[in-house]
Amino acid sequence: MATNVTIIYNGPIVDEIRQGMSIPRYFEPRNSYVDSPVYTEGFENKDGLGDGESYGKSIYATNVDGWVNFPGLIPMNGNTTKFAQFQRAIFAAKKAEDEGSENTGITFEIEGYEEEIYWIQMARNLADQGFYTKVGEEEFGKVGN
């Protein structure tokens, strides 16, 4: 008997006290520290803070879209096909945002108890990363932040 799995990416869970930025952009495609203005545009030190110096664009501001992917291996080149479903959910969220439509994520079918165990465990592990996952009737995470 087939079981449906639905994954919706809602974005990162925001710390209410302080919010930082991820180092890699794998789960936050447009919110890593190398995408921040201080790296991509530089910093003009008008107030003479710290060492008083101003800085140009960082050599680390090289976060180029598509750089970690290889043709024919998208959506993820270094992970299992199963795990790539989570990145597909991220792409679906970005597409919905760009189109101004509802983020319904992705849905697919699995067969067998081993697959169900895998998806339940992954859903538990990634709920705090902003993923809502429904495996059959079991739900993990929140449907929106």
Image (cartoon, rainbow, N blue to C red):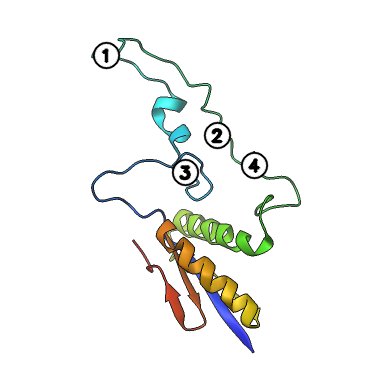
What's the residue type where badge 4 is placed? Val
Of the pair 18 and 39, the residue shown nearer to us: 18
Q: Of the residues shown, which amino acid type is indicated by label 2? A: Asn
Residue annotated with mark 3: 30
Question: Relative to 12, does residue 138 appear above or below in the rendering?
Answer: below
State the residue position of label 1: 46
Inter-mark Cα distance, 4 to 2: 10 Å
**Residue at which label 4 appears:** 68
Label 3 secondary element? loop
Q: Is residue 109 visible?
A: no
Q: To which quarter of the image does residue 88 belong?
A: bottom right
Mark 1 → mark 3, Cα distance in angstroms: 27 Å
Residue neighbourhood size for the residue with mark 4, other residues' Cα within 10 Å, grouped as few (<14), some (14–19), many (≥20): few
Q: Is disc 1 surrounded by few (<14), some (14 to 19) or many (20+) residues within 10 Å? A: few
Residue 119 visible in the snapshot = yes
- Quarter holding the N terminus? bottom right
Please give the name of the residue rendered at 41% of the width and 20% of the height, measured from the top-left corner. Answer: 42
Residue 70 spot, x, y in % from top left: 72, 45
For image coordinates 27% across by 43% down, the residue present is 18
Circle 3 packing at 10 Å, graded few (<14), some (14-19), many (20+), is: some
- Vertical relation: 55 (above or below) 108: above
Q: Do the residues labelled 3 and 4 touch (CB within 8 Å)?
A: no
Question: Label 3 vs label 4: CA separation?
Answer: 15 Å
Residue 63: mark in rendering: 2
> Can you tell which of label 3 and label 4 is closer to the viewer?
4
In this rendering, would 137 be left or right of 44?
Answer: right
Please tell me whether mark 2 sits on a helix, a strand or a loop: loop
**Relative depth, front residue between 102 and 76:** 76
Residues at badges 2 and 1 in contact (C-beta under 8 Å)?
no
